[in-house]
Image: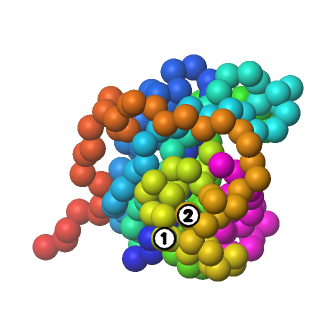
């Protein structure tokens, strides 16, 4: 089992609903258990307004334990984004759902379409704030610093506001998918 952290974010349509749907779908991943989730935060878009649009994001972080390999989890996250209406042609634009694997245990992974830890997470207040809420002492395996220290040192001045919403309240947790037991 590996402990994994995934950031979720939406700035299109009913952002709360998209985040809750993503959380419900993560709860259904095979050989995986969601073990925690941060609050949702409304966050200022980081980057070009021409690319991301003007609507602020809802963001959060989900912790899970999984027996999946990193590439399998990445593929399932991509499939989840598509199922929630993510525009594959315009990945840098506004998005119904964005799922990024932040950490996969303490592993460092460099593959053509997958880099873990996420290469920019330590620069982004909208990722660090919910990460610190969830696990302030989690140590970044490359920077060798706990999340709380990275948040204290981040220079990103984008606004991040905690929302008074219960994550996952629209779609209650269901048992995870797993193959049937053979007798």
The answer to whether mark 2 and mark 1 are in CB contact below 8 A is yes
Image coords of residue 46 (percent x, y): 76, 39
In the drawing, does residue 28 fall left or right of residue 81? left
Q: Which residue is mark 1?
A: 137
Count of numbered circles on the image: 2
**Magenta run includes residue 119:** yes
Q: Which residue is mark 2?
A: 148
> 24 and 152: which one is in front?
152
Q: Which mark is residue 50?
A: none
Label 1 secondary element: loop
The residue located at (40%, 51%) in the rendering is 37
The residue located at (72%, 34%) in the rendering is 45
In the drawing, does residue 132 fall left or right of residue 82? left
The quadrant the C terminus occupies is: bottom left
The residue located at (71%, 29%) in the rendering is 94
Quarter of the image for residue 180 reads: bottom left
In the drawing, does residue 97 fall left or right of residue 154? left
Image coords of residue 85 (percent x, y): 59, 30
The residue located at (66%, 68%) in the rendering is 117
User: What is the span of residues highlighted in magenta in the rendered image?
Assistant: 108-125
Task: Give the mark nearer the N terminus: 2 vs 1.
Answer: 1
């Amino acid at each position: 089992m590996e402990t994994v952290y995934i950031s979720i974010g939406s700035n299109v349509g009913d952002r709360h609903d998209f985040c809750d749907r993503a959380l419900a779908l993560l709860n259904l991943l095979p050989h995986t258990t969601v073990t925690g989730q941060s609050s949702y935060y409304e966050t200022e878009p980081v980057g070009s307004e021409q690319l991301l649009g003007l609507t602020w994001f809802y963001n959060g972080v989900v912790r899970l334990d999984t027996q999946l390999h990193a590439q399998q989890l990445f593929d399932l996250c991509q499939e989840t984004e598509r199922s929630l209406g993510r525009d594959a042609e315009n990945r840098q634009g506004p998005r119904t759902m964005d799922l990024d694997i932040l950490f996969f245990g303490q592993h460092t992974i460099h593959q053509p379409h997958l880099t873990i830890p996420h290469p920019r997470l330590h620069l982004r207040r909208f990722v660090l704030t919910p990460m610190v809420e969830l696990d302030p002492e989690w140590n970044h395996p490359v920077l060798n610093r706990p999340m709380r220290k990275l948040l204290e040192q981040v220079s990103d001045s984008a606004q991040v506001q905690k929302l008074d919403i219960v994550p996952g309240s629209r779609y209650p947790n269901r048992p995870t998918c797993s193959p049937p037991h053979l007798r």
